[in-house]
Image (spheres, helix red, strand yellow):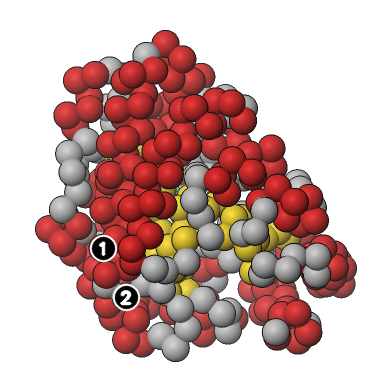
């Protein structure tokens, strides 16, 4: 349940009103915030409190994360000269706070810690658009009109995310998730041509470390086959696709999902009915299923609903197996 903390009063208390990138750079606060949803909900894995923009921020690209908006770039990526602004990440030197937080968490936790990074398309979209976007017009315009530059940018971003993920695994993370949140904006052909090579480079570059690799995006129903071919072990599914259809599309991979986070705003009985639907569909998944929301927790969600949902999943025979 990504961003489970967002709805918690204890998160708001520790987070305060300051800059999220500031909070993320303080290992003690990161440890505390990462543990909060574990204490409250008893979920089966922890996800590191950080953000997909952290490596780009750390190398000085000029990234801000504005509450209620998301990542905002002071000087967006417009052309070849901007490639030089994306230097290699020296994870130990540039993001020591991430490594320290992972090390502390691994000592404290009795459940797996999931590390993560942004996938090249989603990161590039923020860099080129300068912030969140509805149609990714600037991103696609660069992709179609300067394909060589696009591939160089995607490759550089792949190196950045790969370096960050490797450092998190070496510090003790048990699994990693690559977020390509906005890849659903692309056709299958464009995904395979413009995105898959860079994402595949990341998954291949992690192979030797032998931890489960998860891949996730929203509105990616049509892309599930291609996203699984990019090389992950587990593919995330949002609520628009049934888990039965998803399973057919991802072949022998495990799947993760897919309760609509907005369902958790409804009375608990309704949440339960939807969870039953997930169980029924997941029963057709011989290669494993991770019960999860199809995207992040909405801030207005009642924490009690999530606590009851976690208990309900744990009480289910498949949830227990
Ligand atoms: O689940 C977790 O809380 C773990 C930490 C985590 C955050 N961001 C913390 C965060 C993770 C895994 C992310 C990933 C992330 N960040 C993604 C990929 C996953 C997805 O949602 O598709 C993306 C696209 C981002 C970029 C980003 N950062 C957005 C769109 C926002 C929301 C802006 C808003 O306020 O609505 C952020 C801010 C952010 N990152 C919050 C958290 C907990 C929001 C709360 C805050 O500012 O304290």
Circle 1 crowding by C-alpha within 10 Å: few under 14, some 14–19, many from 20:
many
- Of label 1 and label 2, which has the lower sequence position? 1
Q: Which residue sits at x=44%, y=88%?
A: 110
In front of the other: 272 or 7: 272
Label 2 belongs to which residue?
172
Q: Is mark 1 within 8 Å of ligand 1?
A: no
In front of the other: 303 or 81: 81
Label 1 belongs to which residue?
167
The quarter of the displayed image where residue 291 is located:
bottom right
Quadrant including the N terminus = bottom right
Residue 90 rendering spot, x and y as whole percentages: 16, 53
Work out which residue is located at the far left of the displayed protein and give it. 93
- Judged from the image, the secondary structure of the residue bearing numbered disc 2 is loop
Residue 200 can be seen in this image: yes
Q: Is mark 2 within 8 Å of ligand 1?
A: no
Residue 244 rendering spot, x and y as whole percentages: 80, 56
């Amino acid at each position: 349940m990504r961003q489970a903390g967002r709805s918690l009063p204890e998160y708001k208390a520790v987070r305060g009103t300051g800059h999220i990138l500031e909070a993320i750079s303080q290992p003690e606060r990161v440890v505390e915030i990462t543990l909060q949803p574990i204490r409250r909900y008893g979920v089966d894995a922890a996800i590191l409190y950080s953000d997909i923009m952290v490596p780009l921020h750390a190398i000085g690209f000029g990234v801000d994360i504005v509450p209620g908006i998301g990542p905002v770039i002071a000087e967006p990526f417009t052309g070849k000269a901007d490639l030089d602004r994306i230097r290699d990440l020296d994870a130990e030197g540039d993001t020591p706070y991430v490594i320290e937080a992972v090390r502390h968490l691994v000592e404290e936790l009795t459940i797996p810690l999931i590390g993560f990074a942004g996938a090249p398309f989603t990161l590039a979209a923020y860099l080129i658009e300068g912030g969140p976007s509805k149609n990714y017009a600037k991103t696609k315009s660069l992709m179609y009109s300067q394909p060589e530059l696009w591939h160089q940018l995607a490759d550089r971003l792949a190196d950045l995310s790969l370096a960050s993920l490797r450092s998190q695994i070496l510090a003790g993370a048990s699994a990693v998730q690559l977020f390509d949140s906005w890849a659903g904006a692309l056709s299958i052909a464009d995904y395979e041509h413009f995105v898959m090579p860079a994402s595949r480079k990341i998954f291949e570059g992690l192979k030797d470390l032998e931890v489960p690799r998860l891949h996730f995006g929203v509105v990616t129903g049509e892309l599930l086959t291609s996203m699984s071919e990019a090389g992950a072990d587990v593919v995330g599914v949002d609520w628009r696709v049934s888990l039965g259809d998803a399973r057919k599309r991802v072949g022998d991979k495990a799947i993760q999902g897919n309760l609509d986070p907005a369902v958790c705003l409804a009375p608990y009985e309704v949440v339960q009915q939807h969870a039953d639907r997930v169980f029924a569909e997941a029963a057709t998944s011989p290669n494993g299923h991770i019960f999860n929301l199809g995207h992040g927790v909405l801030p207005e969600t009642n924490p009690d609903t999530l606590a009851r949902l976690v208990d309900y999943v744990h009480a289910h025979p498949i949830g227990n197996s």
